[in-house]
Image: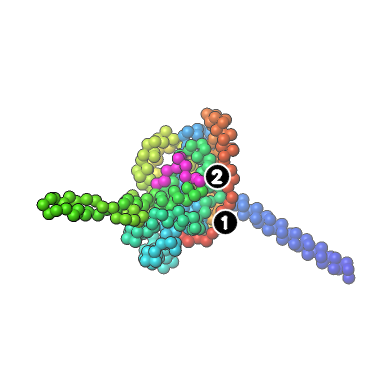
Amino acid sequence: MAMVVQQHETVAFLASAFAAGLIILHGRRQRESIWHPMSSWWIKRRALVENTRLDNLLVIADFDATITTGDSIQCHDMLGFSELMTPAFRREFAPLLDWATNPDVDGVAWWDKAHELMIKHGQPPRHLIPRMVRETRMEPRPGALKLLARLAVLQVPLLIVSAGLSDVIEEFLRQHDALTENITVCSNRLNYGASTRTARMLLPASRPQPATRCRVAGADSAPQSVAPSPPITSFTKDTAYRASSAFFRQHSRRSTLIVIGDSCSDIDAATNVPHEHGISIGFLNGKEIGTEASSKHLQTYDALVLAHDGSLAPVDELVDEIARTDTNVPEKLVRRMSFEVKQQPPARPLRAHSQRGD
């Protein structure tokens, strides 16, 4: 009887070990499948590393669900969900967040309506943006802060082209000590210029009463307009070259592009940008390889990263290799890069709010 029990225990142990092995193997396969390079990736990557000097490199990136995790809240949605905004604004903005039943939440007109409501209600007040960003569920993608730190140390220009809001993006970067001089944000910017009104001075009737401009107290806390007009949207990112003409003039000698985004339209930000070498990395953010939802991404990008918290490490490693391969980069700068660029902690899991993909 004891022998039978011992045999059962042995079988149970082996079964548990086998199951654990399958779980470990499954986990390894999952981790391996996070990075999905196309055949074009290897060809273009080799050309980049062999032919690119660091002072020729330029990076163009989306913000929402690219620099942030795929399930982070997005810029405009942050306003609609934030309890810091007025109830009247949230009430009117709510239909724009109704992805399931409202047919009017897509298209360029979405941004026009969203910005119209922001101006109408004076939302968000400028002084509340830091608190709103700090308290919301917006997290940097794993590897994002490390990549940003590397680009800053190496003085590689980064153009963030986003259909979101510049004010939110810059505040997010500021709170993560990542708003550095090499970064330019091409997005929709809230204009908080002081509002003025015409008033007449009370002077004797025999004297002329000149018109004066009087500042309305507190008016500069509310946005007066949103620029540019028409707005930058997910459908109009091909206007980035014109909208950021000063940036591209300044860096006209940089002829190697790295483009990263999560929507297929994000790569349009590189349209019309002159370059000799280019490579693109896309984030699927929950979509699976082999599904209809990912088919266009497979045709658009040279490599894909899966999962909402898929890492930016492959981009960071590419920049690192370019820097170390370039014999013109001073050894002192390489040592500084190794010292200052530190591994960033992974983002905590979040719940997705948006499907738009700014």
Q: Which mark is residue 340?
A: none
Q: Nearer the viewer, residue 351 or 50?
A: 351
Looking at the image, is 262 positioned above or below residue 318? below
Instruction: Tell me, yes or no, if residue 282 can be seen here.
Output: no
Query: Marks 2 and 1, Cα distance to the nearest angstrom?
Result: 16 Å
* In the foreground, 322 or 223: 223
Q: Amino acid at mark 2?
A: Lys
Q: Position of residue 42 (x, y in %)?
A: 55, 41
Question: Residue 355: x and y, percent?
Answer: 46, 59
Count residues near mark 1 (Cα–Cα under 10 Å), then give few for <14, some for 14-19, many for 20+.
Answer: some
The residue shown at (36%, 40%) is 245
Quarter occupied by the C terminus: bottom left
Q: Which mark is residue 348?
A: 1
Q: Residue at x 39, y 57 (%)?
A: 124
Query: Can you give x and y, in whole percent of width and height, for residue 321 in the image?
Result: 56, 37
Residue 276 location in percent, x, y? 44, 36
* Residue 82 visible (yes or no): yes
Counting every numbered tag in the picture gives 2
Q: Residue furthest bottom?
A: 1
Instruction: Using the image, tell me which numbered label, if any, was put on residue 146.
Output: 2
Question: Is the residue under label 1 in contact with that under label 2 (CB below 8 Å)?
Answer: no
What kind of residue is marked 1? Answer: Arg
Residue drawn at 41 percent across, 68 percent down: 101
Q: Is residue 90 above or below residue 319?
A: below
Q: In terms of secondary structure, where does tag 2 sit?
A: helix
Say few, some or many: other residues with alpha carbon within 10 Å of mark 2 (under 14 / 14 to 19 / 20 or more). many
